[in-house]
Amino acid sequence: MSHASPQTAGAWTPAQIQEVVDTHKSMPGAMLPTLHAIQERFGYVPEAAIPIIAETLRHTRAEVHGIISFYHHFRTQPPGRHVVQVCRAEACQAVGSRQLEAHVKTALGVDYHQTSLDREFTLEPVYCLGNCACGPSVRVNDEVHGRMTAAKFDRLVERLTTMVLEVE
Amino acid sequence: MTITVYVPRDTTALALGADEVAALIEQAANGRGLDIKLIRNGSRGLSWLEPMVEVATAGGRMAYGPVEPGDVADLVDAGLFEGGLDHPLARGLTDEIPYLKHQQRLTFSRIGLTDPLSIDDYRAHRGFAGLEKALRMTSQGIVDEVKASGLRGRGGAAFPTAIKWQTVHDEPQGQKTIVCNADEGDSGTFADRLVMECDPYMLIEGMTIAGLAVGATQGYIYLRSEYPLAHRIFNDALGRAYRAGYLGNDILGSGKAFDLEVRLGAGAYICGEETSLLESLEGRRGLVRAKPPLPAIEGLFGRPTVVNNVLSLAAVPFILDQGGQAYADYGMGRSRGTLALQLAGNVKRGGLVELAFGVTLRELMEDFGGGTLSGRPLKAVQVGGPLGAYLPESQWDNPIDYEGFAAFGGVVGHGGVVLFDDSVDMGEQARFAMEFCGVESCGKCTPCRIGAVRGVEVIDRIRAGDAAEANLALLADLCETMVDGSLCAMGGMTPFPVQSVMKHFPNDLTPRQAQPAGGKPC
Ligand SMILES: Cc1cc2nc3c(=O)[nH]c(=O)nc-3n(C[C@H](O)[C@H](O)[C@H](O)COP(=O)(O)O)c2cc1C
Ligand code: SF4
Ligand code: FES
Ligand code: FES
């Protein structure tokens, strides 16, 4: 069963962010582990995290900004309940990912880097999920799906939107 | 009697429903009052048969695949639990499947056989034998053994591994580091993932041996964030290896130390380039560093660092266990040992094919791959990832080795082989090469950063019939500028696929009516 993005997405306090930063600050090269931990916990890296990270890890705010925007993985807006990534790379192209990609955009009513109005789905491109022998590949949250077709995708969306989230 | 059933748990098996298959098999066994032991093994690398269920019988393990959840009831009726053969998905003895039988598995000898997390399984298949030997050797002795194997880096550049190790070995004592490059960014490649998901202790062992060889006590694995399952399995294995004394301050009571930690990348292709990777590990943007200094001399935090691909490090336990010569006995010319080829894209039988260097592309694509998945004629194959040329049929009879491929402008790279059928629009592929470079360029140098964006524009104009001749000439110039003027291979090799399309598929780069590209979704 696919697990949804963190329930707390969007909800954070400066103290919580500080706490995450503090648990990682003594690692050598702490920046990426810190950003990962923040996104893992809150679903994204809130703007307000930047001064906290900058101060604690001794970088300028501009540097932290630059780092976050350099890496495609980090997002600065809260994502929808499910993050859908469609593989755009060559091996998946060879089995029809371009058509699939068009279908996904229509089915979800969004383009890449957008979140659907009902906040169910955020769509992102990805360049290879390591499932290249059985593409096209799609990742939903932490689960990869292979040999994807338009019909299979529609069933997946159906299942995800009717999925009841467990309350923690 | 307990019946042992195997259902793989690698990304591809799971992506095709292996968890559900496993649950249904357990249910069916319970329903029949049968006592089964269900093992979640790694994949054998026969991706086309995933989920590939195996049942242990007196004569060996029997394979069934690809098993979809809806097939389970039928399979059980046909005698799955007895190793029955009376079902279209029955493949007979796993070891006799030609795809597997005709491989030369030195590195991947264990995948799929074992429970990836079981140290006992690992040991039962010669696991840690190389490490135990290495612990009794001098550091120079270990480097020499790797030298004798002729092993060259499997991450792309094919640099002799022992020379890199020797350099770090010869640096004065002090903090040295082993960095494993598990960024596996090339489309069409998944062998690093298979190592980490299906035989994680092999990588732990290889890195520990590398540490002993060069005098490093710290290792990092830089793993792409696109591999969440590999992350989970590998971290689990790390914890177990620590608890069993294979890592830490006193490896197997030797008094020697080695620590390992996984660090996640963040979706940047360029961070597979070793200096960009080091920048990223240090906590910055992944801007490529100019070389020299080499990472072997000034690497992570300015200290001597070995950066090796997963497959280079994974080859090391075999080399130490069986001797460098045993590895060098395979291969051709200056390409020694075996190569993990990965068949992907529009291919009937995709998966991992480990073979000695020297096999031809055609043998690989036809004998192993079985041609295209769509059944349509094969048109082009891209070997070596997104920076590799698209090869037309006239080049499929070349044996795969580093020098031979380089001679005609081919790239072996990380061993990815991506097949395209005749519905592919090669102009679209050339455009994508430039587009990808535009998205993934680190931005440090102009030919790459600007060239990629211009490349897309120029190709769009050619395809639209807008001064096609002049724009083709412009594209040729642009490619040359990128090849000559880029700091790293991202900008320097992006032209390879583009130039190969211009040369071998010129008809696809003429004005054309819009038509759908790529094969049919399968
Ligand atoms: C743009 C670019 C991307 C690369 N991506 C990877 C990668 O994902 N994995 C890898 O092992 N090497 C990659 N490399 C090669 C590394 O720079 C380096 O040569 C390699 O990690 C060295 O290890 P090896 O000697 O064991 O191959 C890449 C190189 C470039 C220029
Ligand atoms: S060639 Fe591209 S990726 Fe490489 S250093 Fe220059 S800008 Fe960065
Ligand atoms: S720019 Fe965000 S993933 Fe490409
Ligand atoms: S190219 Fe799509 S999973 Fe690798």
Image (tube, rainbow, N blue to C red):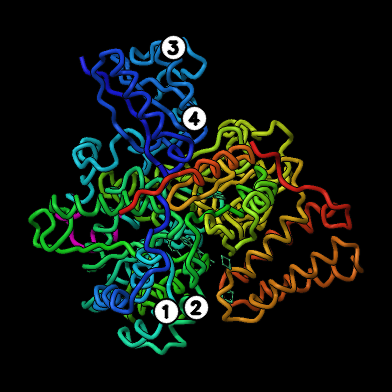
Which quadrant of the figure contains the C terminus of chain A? bottom left
Q: Amino acid at mark 1?
A: Arg
Q: Residues within 10 Å of mark 1 (few under 14, many from 20)?
A: many
Question: Does the beta carbon at disc 2 come under 8 Å from ligand 2?
Answer: yes
> Residues under labels 2 and 3: Cα distance?
56 Å
Q: Which residues are magenta?
A: B133-145
Residue visible at 62% across and 33% down in the picture: B366
Tell which of A58 and B70 is nearer to you: B70
Res. A109 visible in picture: yes
Tell me, yes or no, whether the two marked residues, 3 and 1, touch with CB atoms within 8 Å: no
Label number found at residue B284:
1
Residue under numbered circle 4:
B49
Residue under numbered circle 3:
B85
Residue visible at 65% across and 49% down in the picture: A107
In terms of sequence position, does the residue under pointer 4 or pointer 1 come before the other? 4
- Residue B211: x %, y % from top left: 25, 63
In terms of sequence position, does the residue under pointer 3 or pointer 1 come before the other? 3
- Side of B401 relative to B138 (left or right): right
Label number found at residue B287:
2
